Image (tube, grey):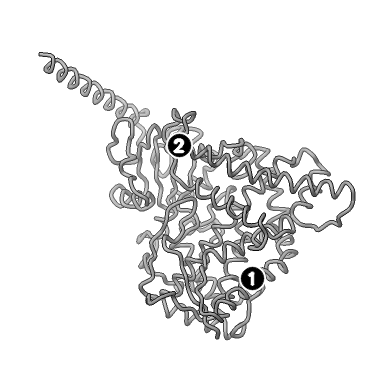
Amino acid sequence: MDYIAIFGGLVLAWTLVKILCLVQEIRSRGYNNRKLPPGPIHLPFIGNLHNLLGEQPHKSLARLGKKYGPIFSLKLGNTTTMVISSSAGAKEVLQKQELAFSRTVPDAMHAHNHHQFSVIWLSMDNRWRQLRKILNTYIFSGNRLDANQYLRSRKIKELIAYCQKHSQTGEAVDIGQATFYTSLSLLSNTIFSRDFADPYVNSGKEFRELVCKFMKEFGKPNIVDFFPILKRMDPQGIRRRISIHGGMLLKLFEGLIDERMEHRKLQTRTSSNDVLDVLLNVSQEDPKAIEKKDIEHMFLDLFVAGTETTSNTVEWAMAEVMKNANVMRKAQTELEEVIGKGKVIEEKDISVLPYLQCIVKETMRLHPPGPFFLRNAKQDVEVCGYFVPKGSLVVVNVWLMGRDPNIWEDPLVFKPERFWGSEFEVRGQDFELIPFGGGRRICPGLPLAMRIVPVILGSLLNSFDWKVEGEIAPKDLDMEEKFGLTLAKSCRLRVVPIPL
């Protein structure tokens, strides 16, 4: 009898759970008869998290998109989620109705209250506008980038010299790692007039490791983002480790700022006109515009967002070019005819190298720096005829948009020619191709990225021929992705530079 009672109790409990789920389903799909996007049935408690199991959630969402369409709904833990992979939907969320959405702040970004100082995570209020204006005016404006062009040119020549040494010994170059160090060196010299990528400087090695550890932790899926009730527990320890690595970086920035302020106070150092000096000048003129803590957190954003994204894009571009021999020949022919074989290209040359520009666009179509743009609905809103309730998470799947056969012919084929003579740009106006986002929250580093990526890629292609390490044929290169903060190559591209 006890077993029958227990069994009966379980059946009753299960029935009650199903009734509650059904009531919730009716409520969630009611909303005054407003229409939610279609989507798979979700389970109690976990919702549709089981649909995203594995290491490639962007591909899992792509499979669901093929079944339910360019706009569909999920339940991720406690969060109602809309996934959008159409250019029209992306434009609605990122531009036309962007004020109805805010950035979704991951739990990890609450470490050191980074979300309260970061221009990436702040709401679009007066404080955000002020910091964004400072970024656009004093760091990423055309005049500032032109003034620092000599520095970028020098660092790219150092990268080519590094590859030249490897070509003499027949040793392979890890393209991703080499360009990551170049990006890190560029940023640290531009901001601090110091080289944190120097392998012979201990502080440089420590700094590189901290940046890598920070990005690795931030790129991990965090269960707390789906179940906020677990926030205090931090079961995966992600926020704790982010707090350690981020804290050490912020402390390092604080020390460099204090040192510079002391030199300025004692006038023992001539002004370098680097980013730190410029921001301290702005703060001195108007202390309310930007404070010391704002500067520290801005530097954290710049290093985390501006290193791996660049190196991954160059690595993907090199891998695709090597895998497609005809693309390599066309690129090298253009470079030889316009620039001259063996020369390092300059930023002014980009405008006269249209095929190189096409390669960069095609790389960003197939391999956008980040697979998703995440937004949170601040109010009830309608997107492309569907109801998006307040508090919903909206995922714009940029990765899938770049592979959509409704937008692109032969979408899985690397074909730079598709952009030849095309007016498609990556600057946030053509929502079929938005690797940097769109609207007012478009990546502020876009102007720098569109200078440095083609110059590095073009210089590598114009200075050497390239051979894949080992006996691997270029057409057999492993092109699998590793999901994280950015979409990196799962298998690093190691290639041997051959002197021209």
| Image quarter (top left, top right, bottom left or bottom right) of the N terminus | top left
- Left or right? Give the position of 299 relative to 19: right
- Secondary element at image label 1: helix
Please say if 146 is above or below 140.
Answer: below
Report the Cα–Cα distance between label 2 and label 1: 39 Å
The residue under the point 76% across, 49% down is 279
Residue in front for this viewpoint, 423 or 63? 63
Residue 219 percent coordinates (x, y):
48, 48
Q: How crowded is mark 2: few (under 14 residues within 10 Å), some or many (20 or more)?
A: some
Q: Residue furthest left?
A: 1
Task: Residue under label 2, please give it.
Answer: 225
Give the amino acid at mark 1: Ile
The residue under the point 49% across, 78% down is 466
Please say if 343 is above or below 142.
Answer: below
- Secondary element at image label 2: helix
- Left or right? Give the position of 41 relative to 433: left
Residue 375 percent coordinates (x, y):
49, 42
Q: Residues within 10 Å of mark 1 (few under 14, many from 20)?
A: many
* Disc sitting over residue 156 in the figure: 1
Residue 460 percent coordinates (x, y):
56, 75
Give the amino acid at mark 2: Asp
Residue 120 percent coordinates (x, y):
59, 45
Residue in front for this viewpoint, 25 or 63? 63
| Image quarter (top left, top right, bottom left or bottom right) of the C terminus | bottom right
Label whose residue precedes the other's in the sequence (2 or 1)? 1
* Disc sitting over residue 82 in the figure: none
Q: Quadrant of residue 293?
A: top right
The residue under the point 50% across, 46% down is 217
Please indicate, yes or no, whether residue 105 appears anywhere in the rendered image: no
Q: Which residue lies furthest to the right in this view?
A: 267
